[in-house]
Image (cartoon, rainbow, N blue to C red):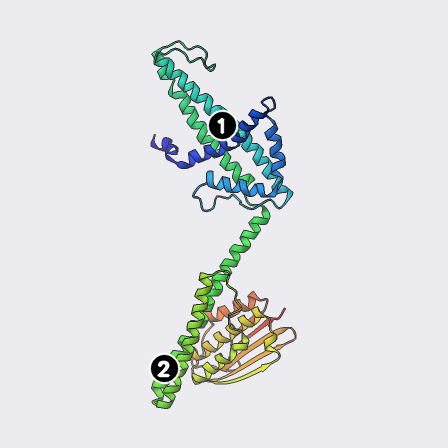
Amino acid sequence: MVRFLRPLLRGTTYTRLLHQWVPMLIQSMWMFIDMSKPWVPGVMLVLLGLVPAVRRGEGVQARLLLTPGEQEPGISEAPSTTWRDRTRTVVWLELRWVLGWISMFVTVWLLVVAFELARAAWGRAPSGLPVLGQLPPHRAWALLTPLPLLVLYGVVVGLGTLITVCARRLLGPSAAERLAALEERTEQLLERTRIARELHDSIGHALTVAVVQAGAARAAGDPEFTERALDAIEETGRVALEDLERVLGILRESERPVSARPTLADAGRLLDSARASGAKVDAEVTGPVAAVPGPVSREGYRILQEALTNVLRHAGAVPVRVRVTVGDGALALEVRNPLPRPIPGPARGSGLRGIRERAALLGGSALTGPEEGDWQVRAELPLG
């Protein structure tokens, strides 16, 4: 019984009833103008539904009154962009107008019926309303008085559910809007993945450099070397903090441009950081690096950063050969270092996987693994 009466306690039941009665305000105004042609507002709704902005207004009303509080109601608030959207809006307006008529008529009629039955059961004379005729006063009518109220309850809840279902079908997102929403969702997921990679690459690189530098300074026991190590740790930590602040800024400000991200033009600080950690870096840059497109240059920087981080983390202060080549419509990155002992197994870390994913995202490829006694990271990114 409690479950049956639960809709009476929901505000949605009454906002949906209000939504059905709103068109009747226009209908009532028209009845003062010409009562002999009650169908004219229905014809006017056809022309009104062809206006693109009307669909947005109907969507806003439906969200507020039919689905209040729902996060994903399945009702669009965008204006009509195609004739299909306009047609659906016209059908919706006509359906809403018809359901408004039914709701208003049935509600008023059932309330009057309940009033007449209660009046007759109380022993009062009929009110004269031509609904049930001239009911003779009798207490037995009290048994029938709740019946029209129960029917009214079912009609109000049923019509509210029906018009909500129709709103989702007729005012729901079009195919183009669903595709746009899917693309936006995909972009958000890609952005989250990119931010995770940014944090992994930047913070992981800084921590690796700091650990290697601290260990080398302790082993060397040389105050001058220790001073250089502390300088390198300080500089690397400062850069990592800048990267962290930038990434957090992206999280706080979703529309912030990515132009502030480091590019291959800033690769010098990566090489200097690796050298300060004891690695003997032999770098060779060929071609116009500054002319590399922004997305390719930014991802290339992160690939180079992750490759150098892996060298310091797994091989330590060893000779490293870095080759950056721009030409033939592609950017080629190669980082080689002597294999540590023991030789590592197949790479399963997120860093090397991230390198391959970055390259694949830009339509390129990446290879990581041992080759001729060296550990190699090689990536090719198309400039187009």
The amino acid on which the numbered mark 1 sits, given as a three-letter code, is Ser
Give SS at disc 2: helix
Q: Which residue is mark 1?
A: 103
In which quadrant is the C terminus drawn?
bottom right
* Quadrant of residue 288 within the rendered picture: bottom right
Q: Which residue is mark 2?
A: 214
Nearer to the camera, 40 or 249: 40
Q: Which mark is residue 353?
A: none
Query: What residue is at 45 percent from the left and 65 percent from the top?
Result: 249
Q: Can you give x and y, in whole percent of width and height, for residue 86 in the image?
A: 62, 40
Nearer to the camera, 185 or 96: 96
Mark 2 is surrounded, within 10 Å at the Cα level, by few (under 14), some (14 to 19) or many (20 or more) other residues, namely some
Of the two numbered discs 1 and 2 in the rendering, the one whose residue sits closer to the viewer: 1
Examine the rendered structure and indicate whether residue 69 appears above or below residue 284: above
Give SS at disc 1: helix
Q: Can you give x and y, in whole percent of width and height, for residue 342 in the image?
A: 42, 80
In which quadrant is the N terminus drawn?
top left
Of all residues shown, which one is farthest toward the right? Answer: 328
Query: What residue is at 61 percent from the left and 28 percent from the top?
Result: 40
The amino acid on which the numbered mark 2 sits, given as a three-letter code, is Ala
Q: Residues at badges 1 and 2 in contact (C-beta under 8 Å)?
A: no
Nearer to the camera, 248 or 181: 248
Mark 1 is surrounded, within 10 Å at the Cα level, by few (under 14), some (14 to 19) or many (20 or more) other residues, namely many
Label 1 – label 2 distance at C-alpha? 79 Å
Examine the rendered structure and indicate whether residue 60 appears above or below residue 366: above
Q: Can you give x and y, in whole percent of width and height, for residue 322 in the image?
A: 53, 81
Q: Is residue 102 left or right of residue 46?
A: left
Which badge, 1 or 2, comes first in the chain's sequence? 1
Query: What residue is at 53 percent from the left and 68 percent from the top?
Result: 259
Q: Can you give x and y, in whole percent of width and height, for residue 185 in the image?
A: 51, 55
- Any part of residue 170 in sight: yes
- Any part of residue 349 in sight: no
